[in-house]
Amino acid sequence: MTKLTLKDIFEQSQKNATCHPKLIQSLKNLFSVLQTKHEVDEFAHHFIGYLKHSLVVGENESAVNCTLDFVAKFVTILESEAVDDEDESEDEVKFLPRYFVKKFYSFIIKFHGVDNRIVRGRICELLSKQLNMMSDEYQMDENIIFDLQTAMIQRMRDKVPTIREIGRAHV
């Protein structure tokens, strides 16, 4: 089997959800070779870069919905397998998934209120999908929870009705 690149994974994630488990495993394999925060920064930069392509699509495209589902699943799985920061020891590699997840949420929080209503809506959709995938036992950093709640409360006051509805559903 040929090793997929991040670009290949994102392109294939658009097709349908049946290939997502295989693609998530490929993405986890790509992530597992990262050894430093700098490497995770590079990975996150490219990951978010590919995600941004889906955030600007205006129509209700099934390819975009598949990509958002894929991203939400990957981040949820990666975070559920992450080691807590409080348990940090000398082995930095164990904490890289948590570091990536924090970078991902920082992106969501930073761009949830952009001027472009399509991007605001897509970010709300992505966050909604992610929150719906979390189990009751799911543990998340309290600061991230607070920031995400604040972002969704702001979206409840959005001038676009569909974005308000998504925000209202998750506060």
Image: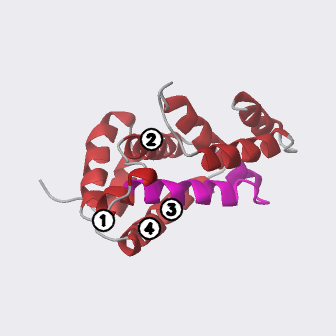
Q: Between tags 3 and 2, which lies in front?
A: 2
Give the residue pinned by disc 2: 76
Circle 3 crowding by C-alpha within 10 Å: few under 14, some 14–19, many from 20 = some
Say which residue appears at 74% left-offset and 47% top-offset: 151
Q: Which residues are magenta?
A: 97-122
Q: At x 75% / y 59%, what residue is drawn? A: 114
In the image, residue 44 lies in the stretch drawn in magenta: no
Residue wearing tag 3: 48
User: Can you tell which quarter of the image residue 85 is in?
Assistant: bottom left
Q: Amino acid at mark 3?
A: Ile
Give the x, y percent position of residue 149: 71, 41
How far apart are labels 4 and 3 at the CA level?
5 Å
Provide the residue designation for mark 1: 90
Question: CB under 8 Å between callouts 4 and 1?
Answer: no
For this view, does 166 lie left or right of residue 129?
A: right
Q: Determine the main secondary structure of the stretch shown in magenta.
A: helix
Q: Earlier in the sequence, mark 1 or mark 2?
A: 2
The residue labelled by disc 4 is: 46
Q: Is residue 124 in sight in this rendering?
A: yes
Mark 3: secondary structure: helix
Residue 60 visible in image: no
* Contact between labelled residues 3 and 4, with CB atoms less than 8 Å apart: yes
